[in-house]
Image (spheres, rainbow, N blue to C red):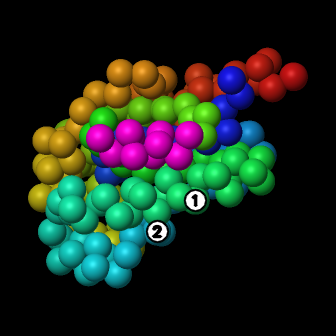
């Protein structure tokens, strides 16, 4: 089946947004960052450096799943979303849209190092958030695993080889 939604998943700091934008450009489809769809209550919680709980995530994930048919109808998309637990990915798959999962794998030490170098719109201090994300992370069974330590061009090439676009 043809893939219409590419889900780039992983913990904060792994490079989901950077890879997602590059992949979307390669595939000539829109890019969406799941963080942009958080409701105000989630944004408020994150601004206080409070990790989100499952109850915070369910409506947000349902909203993303609800947007997928429109994205498919317009030719597909790349979505960057942490999607750390299998139950979260199941909600997204319930949309019934052909989806390929790309897991951007990173060590806790490397993620922490990267986060120390950047500012994020939603989160000020990452330590609690990052620890919670690694605690919640369930390795996806059916995903293309890509190392976050590879150069961006190599990540994109691993996911979408140039010769496959002909």
- Report the front residue among 39 and 94: 94
Residue closest to the eye, 9 or 117: 9
> Pointer 2: what residue?
37
Q: Nearer the viewer, mark 2 or mark 1?
A: 1
- Estimate how packed mark 2 is, as few (under 14), some (14 to 19) or many (20 or more) residues with alpha carbons within 10 Å: some
Residue 159 located left or right of residue 28: left
Residue at figure coordinates x 77%, y 20% from the top left: 164
Residue drawn at x 68%, y 57% is: 70
Horizontally, residue 8 falls left or right of residue 139, namely: right
Please tell me whether residue 155 belongs to the stretch shown in magenta. no
Tell me where the magenta segment starts and ends, as one range.
87-96
In-image side of 60 versus 36 (left or right): left
Q: Quadrant of the N terminus?
A: top right
Residue drawn at 29 percent across, 73 percent down: 42
Which x, y percent locates residue 29?
Answer: 73, 49
Q: Quadrant of residue 54?
A: bottom left
**Residue holding disc 1:** 67
Does 95 appear in magenta? Answer: yes
Q: Could you tell me how many numbered marks the image carries?
A: 2
Q: Tell me where residue 138 appears, x and y as whole percent.
A: 24, 33
Q: Are marks 2 and 1 in contact (CB under 8 Å)?
A: yes
Question: Image quadrant of residue 60?
Answer: bottom left
């Amino acid at each position: 089946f043809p893939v219409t939604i590419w889900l780039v998943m992983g913990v904060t700091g792994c490079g989901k947004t950077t890879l997602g934008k590059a992949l979307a450009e390669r595939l000539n489809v829109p890019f969406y960052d799941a963080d942009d769809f958080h409701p105000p209550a989630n944004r408020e919680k994150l601004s206080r450096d409070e990790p989100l709980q499952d109850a915070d995530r369910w409506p947000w994930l349902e909203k993303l799943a609800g947007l997928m048919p429109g994205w498919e109808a317009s030719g597909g998309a790349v979505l960057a979303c942490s999607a750390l637990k299998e139950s979260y990915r199941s909600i997204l798959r319930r949309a019934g849209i052909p989806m390929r999962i790309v897991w951007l794998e990173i060590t806790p030490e490397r993620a922490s190092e990267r986060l120390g170098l950047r500012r994020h719109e939603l989160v000020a201090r990452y330590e609690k958030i990052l620890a919670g994300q690694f605690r919640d992370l369930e390795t996806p069974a059916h995903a293309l695993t890509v190392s976050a330590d590879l150069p961006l061009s190599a990540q994109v090439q691993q996911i979408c080889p140039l010769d496959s676009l002909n």
